[in-house]
Amino acid sequence: QWNPSHNEHNYALHLRKAMSEGISGFMPHIIIDTGRNGIADERSQCKNWCNIRGAGVGLFATTETADPDVIDAYFWLKTPGESDGCTGTLPSGAQCPRFDADCASTDSLGSAAGEPRAPEAGQWFDYQIKQLAAHARFM
């Protein structure tokens, strides 16, 4: 699938262009969340975002960026280890009242046989943090 913003840097450039064209005199600066982007191309589809299998923690917080005129910082905006959202069935066996179908994508943890179910968004997901740590790329 073709995506003009196939990585965070390109997305920042496209976002800045769109916003500055839409709001006269506005030239935004971007902060990129690196809490889950340590591994490139781990998703089968760009639209998949929930508890991605094989993801790794990315760069530590820093203001030394690839494009300081556009990107102010890299930062872990979402705490690594917090669930992005629940699977249809919670780890307790109950149905998730706030289930989002995106959390059942083929790339989402809990969608494959043998994987633990994901807790609700914001709750600690031990299985996920262990994967994020195992696949971490801090540089």
Image (cartoon, rainbow, N blue to C red):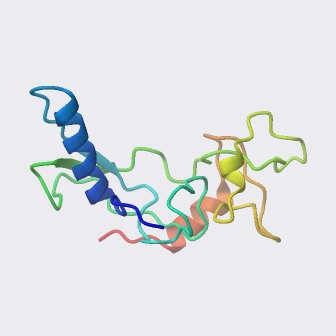
Q: Kindly give the residue lying farthest to the top in the view shown.
A: 24
For residue 111, above or below residue 125: below
Residue at 55% x, 54% y: name it.
49
The foreground one among 139 and 1 is 1
Q: Kindly give the residue lying farthest to the right in the view shown.
A: 93
Q: Residue 29, image x and y in percent?
A: 18, 40
For residue 58, above or below residue 135: above
**The quadrant where residue 113 appears:** bottom right
Q: Residue 114, image x and y in percent?
A: 82, 71
Residue at 80% x, 33% y: name it.
97
The foreground one among 46 and 80 is 46
Q: Residue 84, image x and y in percent?
A: 60, 47
In this rendering, would 73 be left or right of 117?
left
Residue at 78% x, 61% y: name it.
116
Residue at 52% x, 66% y: name it.
55
In this rendering, would 44 be left or right of 56?
right
For residue 84, above or below residue 107: above
Quadrant where the C terminus sits is bottom left
**The quadrant where residue 64 appears:** bottom left
**The quadrant where residue 131 appears:** bottom right
Q: Residue 36, image x and y in percent?
A: 46, 59
Tally of numbered tags: 0
